[in-house]
Image: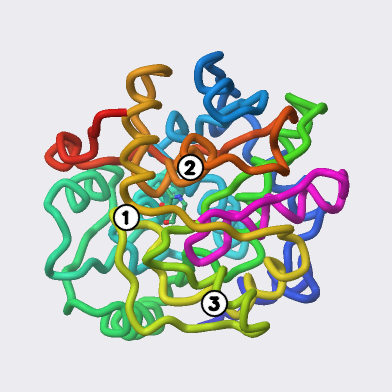
């Protein structure tokens, strides 16, 4: 138990309100330097013309482990390694699980990942390939979280949350710093929203250094938790979510991410699954990029709708991941 307490103390010292700050994001940037890729901004004239804006894509689909998740996971696992933990545990079978496994191996810690009994074999294999042990448990996230907490106590491992944590948000925020450094004339940045950790970090980096730059959050129409929260003026928990963007079907924003999103994000918009498919197809054919549905929602918005706030401006769309199961790829192509 001591290590877990130490770890919590470390976080409390760094982030008094359990919120990311420009300083905590800069600290994460120094840590990540030379460990993960500084992903490129990529453009296509025809896609800029289609969107009516000078458009750059931030290609986190090319990141270590195939998604941005390594940034937050690495920053958090670095904290717990400093505090002397033996191992880490998490309950995500997706991009976060792979990132935690990768970061744990980097720091020489054990990693244990709890996945649902329905998890595809390919996801289990990739976490195992990074040296994690994988356990299947139940079908609901509640069952997996209970099991993860039970084992964390029993083994003295530290639970690594997917988004509702200041160190996780700070790691993700390093994307915001890179965008501002690499393209200072940017006017608007579009970011996918799942539990809200990614956009909390990025929007903090942007608003604390360039408040004139707009941040737009994008989520699937079938999982419009941030959109509904904004409309109702409170953190909404949806009863059911459904979309091909499997990383964004969270039922609600987190307790910690919700206030950050409310404070920093200028606008939240939604896209349909067919708009995501069209973006997947255009990114594949024009830019030769493989982007998973969750990572393609920003392009799904810009390439299908006209938005007055970005017309004639300089816009960055974050492509947040590229881990797509080869068996689902044929179903993602539509005539664009
Ligand atoms: C590819 C991808 N993009 C975006 C997100 C959303 O991130 P967050 O939950 O921090 O909002 C996820 C979450 O798993 C993801 O896997």
Which label sits on residue 320?
A: 2
Q: Residue at x 78, y 36 (%)?
A: 187
Whether ligand 1 has any atom under 8 Å from the Cβ at mark 2 is answered as yes
In magenta segment, residue 197: yes
Front residue of 257 and 216: 216
Q: Residue at x 16, y 42 (%)?
A: 328
Q: Position of residue 288 (x, y in %)?
A: 36, 18
Left or right of 127 on screen, residue 35: right
Q: Which residue is mark 1?
A: 94
Kindly report the distance in space between the C-alpha atoms of the residues bearing marks 3 and 1.
24 Å
Label pair 2/1, CB-CB below 8 angstroms: no
Whether residue 3 is visible here, answered yes or no, is: no
Q: Nearer the viewer, mark 2 or mark 1?
A: 2
Q: Position of residue 31 (x, y in %)?
A: 67, 42
Q: Which residue is mark 3?
A: 4
Eyeballing the image, is 195 above or below 317?
below
First in sequence: mark 3 vs mark 1? 3
Kindly report the distance in space between the C-alpha atoms of the residues bearing marks 2 and 3.
30 Å
Image quarter for residue 155?
Answer: bottom left
Q: Residues within 10 Å of mark 1 (few under 14, many from 20)?
A: some
Q: Residue at x 42, y 81 (%)?
A: 238
Eyeballing the image, is 179 above or below 236?
above
- Name the residue furthest top: 45
The C terminus - image quarter: top left
Q: Position of residue 14 (x, y in %)?
A: 77, 65
Q: How is the image coloured?
A: rainbow
Which label sits on residue 39?
A: none
Element at label 3: helix
Front residue of 93 and 328: 328
Residues in magenta? 193-218
Eyeballing the image, is 53 above or below 305?
above
First in sequence: mark 2 vs mark 3? 3
């Amino acid at each position: 138990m001591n290590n877990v307490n130490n770890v919590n103390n470390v976080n409390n010292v760094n982030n008094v309100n359990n919120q990311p700050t420009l300083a905590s994001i800069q600290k994460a940037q120094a840590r990540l330097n030379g460990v993960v890729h500084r992903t490129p901004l990529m453009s296509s004239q025809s896609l800029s013309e289609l969107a009516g804006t000078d458009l750059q894509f931030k290609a986190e689909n090319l990141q270590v482990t195939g998604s941005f998740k390594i940034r937050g996971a690495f920053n958090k696992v670095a904290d717990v390694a400093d505090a002397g933990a033996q191992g880490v545990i998490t309950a995500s079978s997706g991009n976060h699980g792979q990132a935690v496994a990768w970061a744990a191996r980097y720091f020489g810690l054990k990693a244990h990942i709890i996945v649902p009994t329905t998890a595809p074999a390919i996801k289990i294999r990739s976490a195992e390939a990074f040296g994690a042990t994988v356990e299947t448990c139940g079908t609901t996230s509640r069952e997996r979280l209970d099991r993860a907490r039970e084992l964390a106590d029993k083994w003295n491992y530290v639970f690594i949350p997917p988004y509702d944590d200041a160190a996780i948000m700070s790691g993700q925020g390093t994307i915001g710093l890179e965008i501002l450094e690499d393209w200072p004339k940017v006017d608007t940045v579009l970011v996918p929203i799942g539990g809200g950790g990614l956009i909390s970090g990025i929007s903090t980096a942007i608003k604390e250094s360039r408040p004139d730059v707009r941040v737009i959050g994008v989520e699937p129409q079938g999982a419009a938790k941030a959109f509904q929260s904004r409309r109702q003026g409170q953190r909404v928990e949806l009863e059911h979510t459904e979309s091909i963007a499997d990383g964004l079907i969270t039922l609600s924003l987190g307790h910690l991410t919700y206030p950050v999103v409310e404070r920093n994000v200028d606008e939240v918009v939604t896209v349909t699954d067919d708009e995501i498919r069209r973006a997947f197809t255009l990114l594949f054919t024009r830019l030769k990029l493989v982007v998973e549905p969750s990572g393609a929602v920003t392009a799904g918005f810009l390439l299908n709708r006209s938005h007055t706030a970005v017309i004639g401006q300089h816009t960055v769309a974050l492509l947040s991941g590229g881990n797509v199961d080869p068996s689902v790829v044929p179903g993602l192509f539509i005539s664009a």
